[in-house]
Each structure stands twice: as structure tokens, then as C-alpha cells.
Image (cartoon, helix red, strand yellow):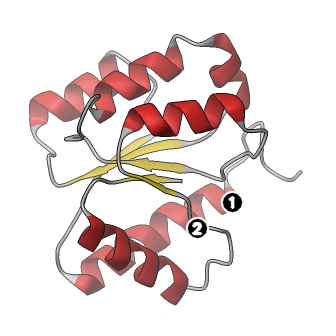
Amino acid sequence: MIIEDDIDDQEILAKVIKGIGVKNEIIFFTDCCDAETFLKANSKQPFIILCDINLPRMNGLEFKKRLDSDSEMRKKSIPFIFFSTAATKPIVTEAFTKMTAQGFFQKSHKMEELRHALTIILEYWKLCKHPNADF
């Protein structure tokens, strides 16, 4: 699941993710409100959530706080990674001290750097043992 309001960025992310061999369906949302509705109403379990920070209606930080405060959402244990160009020290600090972010990566506009970051993130979560992992 990717929450990104820039359609061009969505297309680039989809191309890169498919280019590194990910077979999972990629579900895009342009805002956190729609993503939250989907998560609560759908039994489909996303492998990971990649979320931008600057989004309409509800920003990524607010969204993560809402997920953290919802016991049913916490039980889903979906890895949540901030993936945004808005990576400042105060924002990153907030993500790690006021919520349970599992990662924060700065989105690059250079294709090779973007590919490298997404490869590392996705490979890490494939290997990581967490409640949704295959044991």
C-alpha cells in the first residue's frame, strides 16, 4: 500500500517496484482518509505501508498517530514506513518519538537511488520476523 498524492510519483514508484521484481499488487491512495477507510473495511492485509508526509486532508504523521491509537489497526501489525521528500530533523524525530514508525526514508528523484532504497526496504521486510511474517 502506498499513500502518495502525486500521480507522477505513483507511476514512478509502481514502475520501480515492478522493476525490482515485486509481484504483490500495489494499492495507491492519494490521501490518508481513504487509506484508513480501506484498512478498516477490508480484510486484505497489505505487506507494507509506504506513506508520504505532506498529503491533503490528513498528513502522514496524523495518519500514523490514528493507526497507533486504534487497537484493531495495531493488531494488524502492518509495517509502516514514511517515504517522503519532507525528511527534516523535526519531522523524523516526531515520527520516532511520538509514534511507532518502523522507518523513515527520504524519497529521491534519482531513479537509481529510489530503486536502491525501495529494494532495501522491501527486502528487509521480507526477511524480518513480525506478526505477519511467514515462519
Residue at x 57%, y 42% (from the top left corner): 79
Percent x, y of residue 98: 33, 15
The quarter holding residue 93 reads top left
Residue at x 16%, y 55% (from the top left corner): 85
Please name the residue that numbered disc 2 is placed on.
Answer: 123
Percent x, y of residue 11: 36, 76
Residue at x 56%, y 31% (from the top left corner): 37
Please, is residue 133 above or below residue 42 in the view? below
Secondary structure of the residue carrying numbered label 1: helix
- Horizontal arrangement in the rendering, residue 8 relative to residue 50 (left or right): left
Please name the residue that numbered disc 1 is placed on.
Answer: 127
Looking at numbered disc 2 in the image, what kind of residue is underneath it? Glu
Secondary structure of the residue carrying numbered label 2: helix
Percent x, y of residue 3: 40, 50
Closest to the observer, 71 or 87: 71
Residue 64 bears which disc, if any?
A: none
Please, is residue 97 above or below residue 41 in the view? above
- Disc 1: CA contacts within 10 A as few (<14), some (14-19) or many (>=20): few
CB atoms of marks 1 and 2 within 8 Å = yes
| Residue at the extreme right | 135
Residue at x 67%, y 61% (from the top left corner): 126
How many tags in the picture? 2
